[in-house]
Amino acid sequence: MPTKQKQQPAEGNSSAPTMADVGRIAGVSAMTVSRALKGNAYIAKGTLDRILAAVDQLGYVLDQSAGSLSSRRTGFIAAIVPSIDNSNFADTARGITEALARTNMQLLLGYSNYSVEREEELIESMLRRRPEGIILTGGHHTRKARGMLSNAGIPVIETWDRPENPVDAVVGFSNADAMEALVDSLVEQGYSRFGFISGSETSDTRGQQRQSGFSRALSRHGFSSERRVAVEAVPLRMSDGGTAIRQLLNRFPDTDVAVCVSDLVAFGAIMECRRMGLSVPHDIAIAGFGDYEIASVSEPGITTVNVDSYGIGTQAAGQMIAMLDHRGHSATISTNYHVLLRGST
């Protein structure tokens, strides 16, 4: 059940705050702000506290490149992904890189390890070097990170999500809608006793959205969504799927299909079922999410949702290039997804 690409206007970023703005709020000169932030002079604690409070209020980021660059063009785009081990996010980064290859810009890549606090640190570090734009994974950020992004004065694109209140532009899809489409397809196959294996509720926001879509779909069909097991490990690994499927079947032995938050978890669950002497899909069916490469080479192949990870990267980079060339404006671009039914169900 793919979505169609569409664009909707969104409010763009305001101009970036300056040292003078920070100084006005803190009641000091711009020079004092500079000395305080560079840490090369003694500043009284009370004064420093006022400066840091003003920095936080404005989302100001010290421009470390200002003294050495005569132009605002730095020639690179920054991007933050949750993990470099995850093939889906690696595909998104590859899509960004290959799209940027048609320009003179380079990619500066960081990974947050699924932590919004770590993302905040990366955003501040990257903005100090004044990238021409920044591409993020997801729409959930700390208050400080959001303030820095909103006041950076550069294009910001959030991907892999459809946030209700985006910072700037969006290139992504609804994780809840995509999971709902998967559940609908499994109901059409005749399954009714659904289990769900999810990630940490505190760090995996996209996983939470998928769980929401799972519950929403089952409620619409009149089925229970209470069979759930959460894995607290970050990031999720194949071995976590084995542990979780045992827990799920111990608690809910009548489950006829286990839907996993990702294909890695689904693969681990299939391997554990084999060790337990269970046949997939005859004794229990298993589905994943993301269409990782392992989903197609697994035996049986894993039923999943393809979300075009590479395409998210190319479209995000294309939108970024258009915004930098003043050919595009802040927009919400809905990317495609579709259900792939394979042998695991």
Image (cartoon, rainbow, N blue to C red):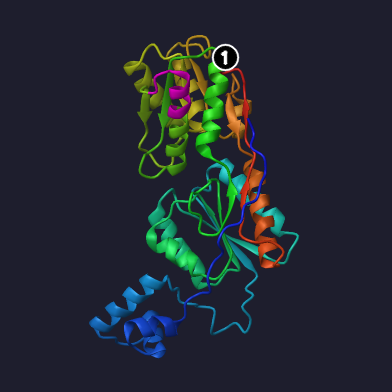
Q: Nearer the viewer, residue 117 or 192?
A: 192
Read off the residue under disc 1.
189
Q: Is residue 223 magenta?
A: yes
Quick one: quadrant of the C terminus? top right
Q: x, y percentage for residue 108?
A: 58, 62
Q: Does any portion of residue 214 appear in the rendered image?
A: yes
- Percent position (x, y) of residue 181? 56, 28
Query: Residue 160 in the image: x percent, y percent?
Result: 55, 46
Image quadrant where one finds the N terminus: top right
Dot 1 amino acid type: Gln
For this orientation, the residue located farthest to the right is 102
User: Magenta region, mostly helix, strand or loop?
Assistant: helix
Image quadrant where residue 301 sits: top right
Q: Is residue 39 visible?
A: no
The residue positioned 25% from the left and 85% from the top of the image is 44
Query: In the shown orientation, is residue 150 left or right of residue 329?
Result: left
Q: For the point 43% across and 65% down, which residue is it?
A: 147
Residue, x 57% and y 21% (percent of image)? 185
Q: Quadrant of residue 236?
A: top left
Asked if the magenta segment contains residue 262, the reply would be no
Above or below for 83 versus 34: above
Q: Could you classify mark 1 by the number of other residues whose Cα lies within 10 Å: few (under 14), some (14-19), or many (20 or more)? A: few
Q: Which residues, given as a range, are shown in magenta? A: 215-225
Q: Is residue 19 above or below residue 80?
A: below
Q: Nearer the viewer, residue 101 or 272?
A: 101
